[in-house]
Amino acid sequence: MGYDAAVLRRATRRLEEERTAREERTEALKKKLYAQIPELSDIDRQLRGTVADIITACLRKGSDPGPALKVIKDKNMDLQVRQAQLLQQAGYSPDALDDVPGCKKCKDTGWVGAQMCDCLKALCAQEQVKELSKLLDLGEQSFDAFSLDWYSPLPYAGESVSPKENMEFIYELCLNYAQKFGRFYYPNLLFTGDPGLGKTFLSACIAKTVAENGFSVVYDTAVNLFAQFEEQKFSRDVQEGREAQQETRRYLNCDLLILDDLGSEMTTPFVQSALYTLVNTRLTREKATVISTNLSMDGVRARYNGQTASRLEGEYRALRFYGEDIRIKRSQLI
């Protein structure tokens, strides 16, 4: 899972902050209990001293350190037993003063060998949802909040099923896509249809669920995305060009890219080329993509070159949204 570097930095910083806070709480508890129960402080000094005694015994030459080590270990064990008794008498667990890591698998490092630990993955997922929330109202946009009541159950001109029946199918497919991400039959989805029918809402629902399940997700509009590709190629400012390059890498490498409002951009020859590169690269790398557009499939064919249109038709599961504009229906109720 290729998390954005900024997301990984924030998650790692949170892990470090949690570790520091836990260590500070343990130190504060030690000071409190040592003041209340001086014997605990004395035991702590003796336990630290036994470590030095063991090292000395091991390094001593000319004599067998075995007997000395056994005596020290026995003494150490007796001290630990007494410490546990005092803590329990005071109402604390026997290990209350131990520096116990929050994650036993990685010892709060975030990594097990070269593999990211589940604890760090969880923090990355949380940070990623925060990142997506800057662009999408993820508090309100969720599968649980999606309502079919806005779609008419009546026949719709030119269609075999009603808008509501159509949306029931689309909703179930999108829900399964998000919940089974990476294992679902269709890796790529193409939402087509007029504005105000729920394409962006369902895109946000997918983004939230997939991100919460620990996958890297990038959401952006077509206008912003192609602006970054142009900035990368044509910018004369080194810093801006470098930042745009980082953004385009995110678009190409994330587990799931959600490209919203395709067709709203100025369709120049450069944009045609950038879109083909984006679509083809992600297909080659087996990265999943969800694209939404107000264009029909005929409109997609007319607007974009044959290679791009062919890949969108052949490699994406097209879902056509139709019915009355929900935004207009809502405004009429206010």
Image (spheres, rainbow, N blue to C red):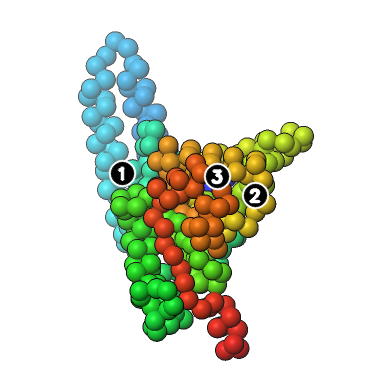
Helix, strand or loop at label 3? It is: loop
Pointer 3 or 2: first along the chain: 2
How far apart are the two marked residues, 1 and 3, measured between alpha carbons? Answer: 78 Å
Helix, strand or loop at label 1? It is: helix
Q: Residue furthest bottom?
A: 333
**Do callouts 1 and 3 mark residues in contact (Cβ within 8 Å)?**
no
The residue pinned by badge 1 equals 79
Other residues around mark 1 within 10 Å, as few (<14) / some (14–19) / many (≥20):
some
Q: Is residue 183 above or below residue 173?
A: above
In this view, the mark in front (3 or 2)? 3
Q: Is residue 92 left or right of residue 273?
A: left
Identify the image quadrant of the C terminus: bottom right
At horizontal 54% and vertical 77% (from top left) the residue drawn is 325
The residue pinned by badge 2 equals 267
Other residues around mark 2 within 10 Å, as few (<14) / some (14–19) / many (≥20):
some
The residue pinned by badge 3 equals 305
In this view of the protein, can residue 325 be seen by the observer?
yes
Image location (x, y in percent) of residue 12 = 51, 45
Closer to the camera in the image, 22 or 230:
230
In this view of the protein, can residue 144 be seen by the observer?
no
In this view, the mark in front (1 or 3)? 3
Which of the 4 image quadrants contains residue 319?
bottom left
Image location (x, y in percent) of residue 286 = 40, 41
The amino acid sitting under disc 2 is: Thr
Closer to the camera in the image, 266 or 45:
266
Identify the image quadrant of the N terminus: top left
